[in-house]
């Protein structure tokens, strides 16, 4: 099977478990020694729930570039969205090559989930939970596609391609126009149909 | 004693046969000579890493999917003893396979709303003051099939996305203290080093309460499929949030509404609204022995045994019914009862040989009582798919075979 083959072929080396090799902080030794004295004095503060006291001096300072390379999460307001842009027309081509095999023609679903739906489908006998019917934020679609898709080769789409294929999935749901460009400014402004569909867990607390 | 190896083997072969036959032949007249019952076969030498007896075959049940890297396997709870799940049988749920991680290369980054962004190596984490505590981990999709009146035929299939291990690690609050949490931080994002970089939003309140960054499981290093070399353990919270292969924690003002806390792991109600951040696991119990697929032997004494747990604290009471809920008896809880961990309960039972329907229901220290399916549906409808903690029943037939009572 082609799909199986693709999975076996996937380059595990691309998995960025260690994209920022270790880099020792020059001030580390000083920090360790200096903080020995503060260790016991800080224990009551920690016990009281104040989480600011360095007691152990372990760990090293994280560099700005190192953080930037790992900090890929996109918040619901679009914080963290990268440069780049794309619209549904280009996205359709990306989808054809990289997504359709599992997710079906025009987001109809196949071996894996489909993308097209409306919130009205959240009630009744047979409910449909997907991007169109259920997802509250368009930014999450960008985030998930970038971190996890395509399933067997995550990390192989460019940011432009991800904006484009995100635009295409939104377009399939009638949420944006075919030539409407999605980028760091426009994507967070997209109002998903089910944005107001979630309520916080009302179950009893301990 | 036989003088050479071959005659010794022959002798032992006969002994083994006799041993097997003994139970069945106890009432027969010609008992074998007593000296032949004594074991004398030289056994296996010592070995570096143990394995179970070849007679023991309990195994995880794998869900067949198009993508075996995004799948699950279930703990054989029907074969479990006590409260600790062997690491090799702890259920799995992966979204992009089990990554191969060299612990010497693995890093944990803590950043965002902190005073000092820090990178911890695995060795750094292991140097810190450690704690060891048993906690259950349960996928919130566990017992998802039990939302249907029919239910699953075995306890492995109905409840096997839950397991309990002793976790060793450092309190997350200790690592956060080293980085220094800024005043505006109310949540954090935890992310794994698997191919999909699984992530979940967690409240700072939970992080400062009992969250662990664990590296040990049941006395040895985490198994790769359980997050080696570092994982988050959020006692009592749904399994998905206990991020494995933990590589990043970002302190934030609010939750990030990631895919696995919006499109998945949310509870759809009948009116089309969905509950979000349903992180605590409600109290639940199930009888594991006898349970579906098993057979009770002869009439007479038969212990009933099962597991109970709650994401909100300790189990304080388990009741068992052997007549389908007509009457209930209080089960014995195996000590010590620990918070947010499996609790083993037992009930003495004399099986008279007729049909019986076995049920269990538990109560936790908050006063919450495990509901029936009808009660659960009255509260949440039928659409949720997650967090099903209904009372589960097993039917004992007159021939001693046990099956799903709902079928």
Image (cartoon, rainbow, N blue to C red):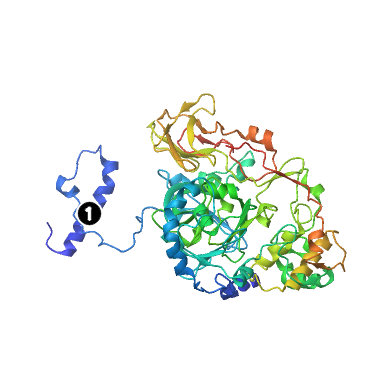
Image coords of residue A159 (percent x, y): 73, 72
- Residue A145 lies left or right of residue B105; in this view the side is right
- One can see residue A109 in this view: no
Q: Is residue A198 visible?
A: yes
Question: Vertically, is A101 above or below B85?
Answer: below
Image quarter of the N terminus of chain B: bottom left
| B305 and A67: which is toward the camera | A67
Residue B324 is left or right of residue A90, and the answer is: left
| Mark 1 residue element | helix
The C terminus of chain B lies in quadrant:
top right
* Disc 1 chain ID: B
Is residue B23 shown above or below A1? above
Please say if B332 is above or below B234. Answer: above
Left or right: B6 with respect to B151?
Answer: left
Residue B56 rendering spot, x and y as whole percentages:
38, 52
The foreground one among B305 and B173 is: B173
Q: Viewer-proximal residue, B319 or A184? A: A184
Q: Identify which residue, A84 or B288, lies in the foreground.
A: A84
**In terms of image quadrants, where is residue B247?**
bottom right
Count the marks: 1
B145 versus B240 height, above or below: above
Q: Quadrant of residue B195?
A: bottom right
Residue B209's spot in the image, x, y percent?
53, 46
What residue is pinned by disc 1?
B14
* Disc 1: CA contacts within 10 A as few (<14), some (14-19) or many (>=20): few
Q: Position of residue B218 (x, y in %)?
A: 41, 53
């Amino acid at each position: 099977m082609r799909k199986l083959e693709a999975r076996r072929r996937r380059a595990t080396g691309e998995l960025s478990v260690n994209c920022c090799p270790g880099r020792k902080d020059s001030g580390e030794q000083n920090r360790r020694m200096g903080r020995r004295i503060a260790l016991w004095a800080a224990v009551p503060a920690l016990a009281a729930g104040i989480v600011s006291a360095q007691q152990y001096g372990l760990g090293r300072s994280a560099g700005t570039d190192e953080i930037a390379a790992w900090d890929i999460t996109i918040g619901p307001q679009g914080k963290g969205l990268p440069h780049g842009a794309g619209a549904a027309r280009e996205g359709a081509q990306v989808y054809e090559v990289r997504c359709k095999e599992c997710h079906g023609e025009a987001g109809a679903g196949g071996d894996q989930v489909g993308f097209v739906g409306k919130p009205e489908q959240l009630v009744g006998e047979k409910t449909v939970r997907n991007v169109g019917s259920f997802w509250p934020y368009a930014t999450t679609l960008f985030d998930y596609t970038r971190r996890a898709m395509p399933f067997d080769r995550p990390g192989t789409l460019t940011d432009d391609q991800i904006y484009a294929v995100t635009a295409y999935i939104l377009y399939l749901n009638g949420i944006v126009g075919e030539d409407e460009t999605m980028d760091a400014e426009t994507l967070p402004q997209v109002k998903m149909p089910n944005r107001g569909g979630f309520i916080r867990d009302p179950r009893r607390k301990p | 004693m036989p003088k050479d190896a071959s005659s010794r083997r022959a002798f032992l072969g006969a002994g083994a046969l006799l041993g097997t036959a003994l139970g069945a032949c106890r009432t027969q007249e010609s008992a074998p000579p007593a000296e032949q019952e004594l074991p004398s076969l030289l056994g296996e030498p010592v070995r570096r890493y143990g394995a179970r007896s070849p007679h023991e075959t309990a195994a995880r049940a794998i869900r067949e999917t198009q993508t075996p890297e995004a799948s699950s396997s279930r703990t054989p709870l029907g074969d479990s003893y006590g409260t600790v799940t062997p690491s090799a049988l702890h259920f799995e749920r992966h979204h992009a396979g089990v990554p191969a991680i060299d612990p010497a290369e693995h890093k944990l980054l803590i950043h965002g709303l902190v005073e000092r962004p820090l990178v911890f190596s695995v060795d750094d984490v292991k140097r810190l003051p450690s704690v060891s505590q048993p906690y259950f981990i349960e996928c919130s999709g566990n017992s998802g099939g039990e939302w249907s009146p029919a239910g699953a035929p075995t306890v492995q299939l109905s409840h096997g996305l839950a397991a309990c291990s002793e976790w060793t690690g450092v309190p997350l609050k200790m690592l956060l203290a080293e980085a220094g949490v800024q005043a505006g931080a109310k949540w954090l994002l935890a992310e794994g080093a698997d191919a999909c970089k699984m992530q979940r939003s967690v409240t700072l309140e939970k992080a400062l309460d009992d969250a662990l960054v664990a590296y040990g499981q049941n006395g040895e290093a985490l198994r790769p499929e359980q997050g080696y070399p570092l994982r988050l353990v959020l006692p009592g919270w749904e399994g998905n949030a206990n991020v494995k292969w933990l590589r990043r924690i970002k302190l934030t003002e609010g939750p990030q509404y990631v895919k696995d806390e919006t499109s998945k792991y949310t509870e759809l109600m009948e009116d089309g609204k969905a509950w979000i951040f349903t992180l605590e696991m409600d109290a639940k119990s199930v009888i594991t022995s006898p349970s579906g697929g098993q057979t009770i032997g002869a009439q007479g004494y038969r212990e009933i045994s099962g597991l109970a747990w709650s994401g909100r604290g300790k189990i304080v009471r388990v009741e068992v019914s052997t007549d389908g809920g007509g009457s209930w008896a209080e089960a014995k809880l195996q000590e010590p009862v620990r918070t947010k961990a499996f609790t083993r309960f037992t009930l003495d039972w004399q099986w008279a040989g007729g049909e019986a329907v076995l049920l269990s229901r538990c109560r936790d220290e908050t006063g919450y009582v495990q509901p029936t399916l009808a009660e659960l549906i009255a509260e949440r409808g039928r659409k949720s798919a997650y967090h099903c903690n209904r009372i589960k029943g097993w039917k004992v037939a007159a021939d001693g075979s046990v099956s799903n009572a709902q079928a």
